[in-house]
Amino acid sequence: NAGVTQTPKFQVLKTGQSMTLQCAQDMNHNSMYWYRQDPGMGLRLIYYSASEGTTDKGEVPNGYNVSRLNKREFSLRLESAAPSQTSVYFCASRKKGGLNTEAFFGQGTRLTVV
Amino acid sequence: DAKTTQPNSMESNEEEPVHLPCNHSTISGTDYIHWYRQLPSQGPEYVIHGLTSNVNNRMASLAIAEDRKSSTLILHRATLRDAAVYYCILRDWRSNDYKLSFGAGTTVTVRA
């Protein structure tokens, strides 16, 4: 049982390049999330998908797009990377339903934009 | 969103209990108290959550003040593996977005 898998684990981009961060979960969870964590800071929600076919903006959506490809996969795209997007990106999933089910996080993608 | 206040850091000796405080004086009646922790170079992991009553699980205990304006996460016997950043988070159970607002958390150091 792999849980939440993120690829790649590390990436270096040049300013203006684009890339897609991949996330897949094998727990049959309905909801998926993308967070970013800047050095020494807490996590901030970028986008989330409450269920397959829906996506919504979080706290810091500018510069990102997402796709909920199917129930398992939720990708995050940077169309034109900027140095300010240097961060660690975490994907999470959660079983919908129940008042407060826990979220499961991936290991993170460490992105550097130069 | 109601905010939480935690100490920046705490130290403990191995095998001793750790009490991590969290203040949330503006908590609303529909806010659950969640605790997550983040081990070095890893994603956060769920620890425990509660609403009004004290809660126990295999990882920790959560003690919630009667007025709910504060809570304490208790690690009963710290191990080196418990060295992590611990986040106290409030989440309105009515919300669908699971917008966990992670602050800076408390960095726990465990001495061997």
Image (cartoon, rainbow, N blue to C red):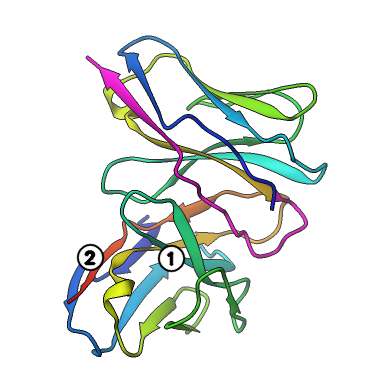
Q: Which residue is mark 1?
A: A25
Q: Residue A99 at what x, y percent from top left?
A: 73, 50
Majority secondary structure of the magenta segment? loop
Say which chain tag 2 marks: A
Identify the secondary structure beneath mark 1: strand
Q: Mark 1 belongs to which amino acid? A: Gln
Q: Residue B50 at what x, y percent from top left?
A: 68, 34
Q: Residue A16 at what x, y percent from top left?
A: 25, 90
Identify the secondary structure beneath mark 2: loop
User: Can you name the residue that lies furthest to the right here?
Assistant: B29
For disc 2, the neighbor class at 10 Å (few under 14, some 14 to 19, many from 20) is: some
User: As drawn, is A97 to the left or to the right of B15?
Assistant: right
Mark 2 or 1: the one toward you: 2
B104 relative to A11, above or below: above
* Point 57% across, 36% down: residue: B5
Tell which of A22 and B33 is nearer to you: B33
> In the drawing, what numbered circle is on residue A88?
none
For disc 1, the neighbor class at 10 Å (few under 14, some 14 to 19, many from 20) is: many
Q: Residue A57 at what x, y percent from top left?
A: 58, 76
B102 relative to B11, above or below: below
Q: Give the residues in magenta.
A: B92-112
- Rendering quarter of residue A43: bottom left
Disc 2 and disc 1: Cα gap in Å?
Answer: 16 Å
